[in-house]
Image (cartoon, grey):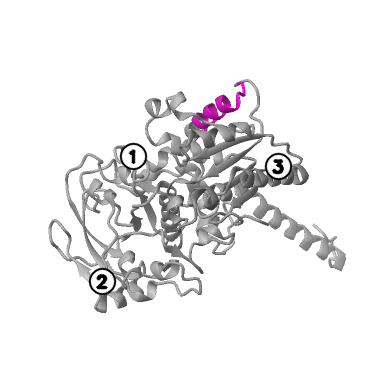
């Protein structure tokens, strides 16, 4: 079509023809992506629908094994808690982070009441932490134990697990695994194997022994697991069936993961903490918990439902057991005074005003202090708090709720002032920084001039 009879096509005609072919081919590729694919190995595609039932065979069963509910094409990881609630939140954060780096599905137990009231029933993790939101944020699925094994089951399952606690406490005369009430609740009969000594974190900061995340993770892979089991590691037969089992590979399990870090001890205090950055900051409250907390805050601050919630500074003052750490210093000189705390509140308010243009005049206090005179002094400062007895919070919702509501109040402050050394204050500070770009301070204590600056 580009030549006439008896003449050869010109160079220009040939170029035009080739250009036309190129453009036609390119357009076909562009408009028909399903018919033409580049041979490139991109990252794996993960479903955005986080359905826990994809990782079990069906509803919870009497036993958890592969023949019952766990899938044989999936590997899992679990651990348990035996500390205060905030420490347990950190422990589960560490467990989920370990699940990420081992590419295993974490199975989260319920929270158990140790510091609240022993009579409080276990509380489902996903009833306070928004699990679908957490899963979406980290790009990873989570299971909870009640989705795997029937909570009413009386069948005792045998399981082999690693003991980190025993390794970190080898200096004790008779080191042993860390026990947890959750294990009995789940009807698990565990045979413990002490982890190799090399799981201990090598750190110049030795306030308390910790295990290394990646050393623990390696036990979830064939080479480190195989070589470790060839060495002479202490094994404890299960308490009921008296069977000695190697640590399970399908369901990797550790006794206690609170003392686990990547680089140095107590890493959740530090801004680079991988467990906080990749997991902890994404552990947001459920919408129901947020609503309950907001209702309490509105009444405490006398804010009508029809009005927007004003920005406030939240405070957490821990006294209780901290009095026992005063080492002979009188409590009124050891614990930070309200004037010291008020100075920190003013700093937070000033920072919010200059950095963000926020006037946070409302101040709401959470504390374990029981002295009425102390609370009267709080009122004299113009600050407020939630009166859980007057609200009948425990009677209406349950014994766990004052602790949950306190944590939510703290985390939702535009600014926060807390108590140094308290993990509840630590997590509140982290949440306010991460969730609201807020201003935070942690008050030092231990002597009269501890917080001078």
Which residue is painted at 49% across and 73% down in the image?
Answer: 203
Please report whichever mark, 2 or 1, sits nearer to the chain's N-terminal start.
1
Q: Nearer the viewer, residue 227 or 396?
A: 396
Placement of the N terminus among the 4 image quadrants: bottom right
Q: Position of residue 75 (x, y in %)?
A: 34, 58
Q: Which residue is mark 1?
A: 117
Q: Residue at x 84, y 66 (%)?
A: 9
The answer to if 413 sits in the magenta stretch is no
User: Can residue 293 be found in the magenta stretch?
Assistant: yes
Instruction: Count residues near mark 2 (Cα–Cα under 10 Å), then give few for <14, some for 14-19, many for 20+.
Output: few
- Lateral position of residue 322 relative to residue 119, left or right: right
Q: Main secondary structure of the magenta part?
A: helix
Residue at the spot of label 2: 173
The span picked out in magenta is: 290-304
Q: Does label 3 or label 1 sit earlier along the sequence?
A: 1
Where is residue 248, by image quadrant?
Answer: bottom left
* Residue 130 picture location, percent across and down: 47, 41
Measured in 3D between alpha carbons, the distance from the residue under mark 2 to the one under mark 3, in whole angstroms, is: 51 Å
Where disc 2 sits, the SS reads: loop
Q: Is the residue 299 above or below the residue 313 in the image?
A: above
Answer above or below: position of 368 versus 429: above
Q: Which mark is residue 362?
A: none
How far is the residue under mark 3 from the one under mark 1?
35 Å
Residue at disc 1, secondary structure = loop
Q: Which residue is mark 3?
A: 349
Determine the secondary structure under disc 3: helix
Residues 159 and 381: in front is 381
Residue 206 image offset from top left, x and y in percent: 46, 71
The residue under the point 29% across, 46% down is: 148
Q: Nearer the viewer, residue 433 or 302?
A: 302
């Amino acid at each position: 079509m580009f030549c006439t009879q008896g003449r050869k096509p010109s160079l220009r005609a040939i170029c035009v023809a080739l250009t036309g072919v190129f453009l036609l081919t390119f357009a076909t590729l562009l408009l028909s992506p399903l018919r033409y694919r580049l041979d490139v190995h991109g990252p794996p595609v993960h479903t955005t629908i986080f359905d826990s039932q994809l990782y079990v065979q069906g509803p919870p069963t009497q036993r958890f094994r592969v023949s019952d509910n766990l899938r044989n094409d999936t590997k899992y990881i679990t651990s348990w808690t035996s500390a205060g609630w905030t420490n347990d939140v950190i422990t589960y954060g560490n467990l989920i982070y370990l699940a990420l780096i081992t590419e295993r599905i974490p199975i989260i137990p319920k929270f158990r009441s140790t510091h609240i009231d022993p009579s409080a029933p276990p509380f489902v993790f996903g009833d306070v932490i928004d699990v679908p939101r957490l899963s979406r944020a980290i790009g990873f699925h989570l299971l909870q134990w009640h989705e795997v094994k029937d909570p009413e089951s009386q069948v005792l399952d045998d399981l082999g697990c690693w003991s980190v606690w025993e390794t970190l406490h080898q200096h004790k005369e008779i080191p042993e695994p860390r026990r947890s009430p959750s294990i009995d609740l789940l009807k698990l009969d565990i045979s413990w194997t002490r982890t190799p000594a090399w799981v201990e974190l090598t750190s110049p900061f030795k306030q308390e022994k910790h295990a290394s995340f990646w050393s623990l993770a390696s036990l979830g892979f064939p080479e480190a697991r195989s070589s470790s089991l060839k060495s002479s590691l202490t094994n404890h037969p299960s308490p009921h069936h008296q069977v000695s089992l190697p640590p399970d590979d399908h369901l990797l399990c550790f006794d206690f993961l609170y003392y686990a870090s990547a680089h140095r001890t107590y890493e959740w205090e530090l801004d680079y903490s991988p467990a906080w950055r990749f997991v902890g900051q994404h552990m947001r409250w459920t919408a129901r918990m947020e609503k309950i907390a907001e209702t309490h805050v509105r009444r405490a601050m006398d804010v009508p439902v029809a009005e927007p919630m004003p920005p406030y500074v939240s405070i957490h003052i821990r006294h209780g057991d901290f009095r026992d750490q005063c080492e002979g210093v009188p409590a009124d000189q050891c614990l930070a005074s309200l004037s010291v705390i008020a100075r920190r509140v003013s700093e937070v308010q000033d920072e919010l005003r200059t950095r963000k243009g926020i006037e946070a005049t409302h101040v709401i206090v959470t504390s374990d202090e029981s002295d009425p005179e102390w609370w009267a002094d709080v009122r004299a400062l113009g600050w407020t708090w939630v009166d859980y007895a007057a609200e009948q919070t425990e009677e209406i919702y349950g014994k766990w709720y004052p602790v949950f509501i306190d944590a939510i109040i703290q985390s939702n402050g535009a600014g926060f002032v807390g108590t140094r050394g308290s993990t509840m204050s630590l997590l509140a500070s982290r949440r306010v920084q991460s969730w609201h770009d807020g201003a935070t301070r942690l008050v030092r204590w231990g002597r009269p001039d501890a917080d001078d600056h």
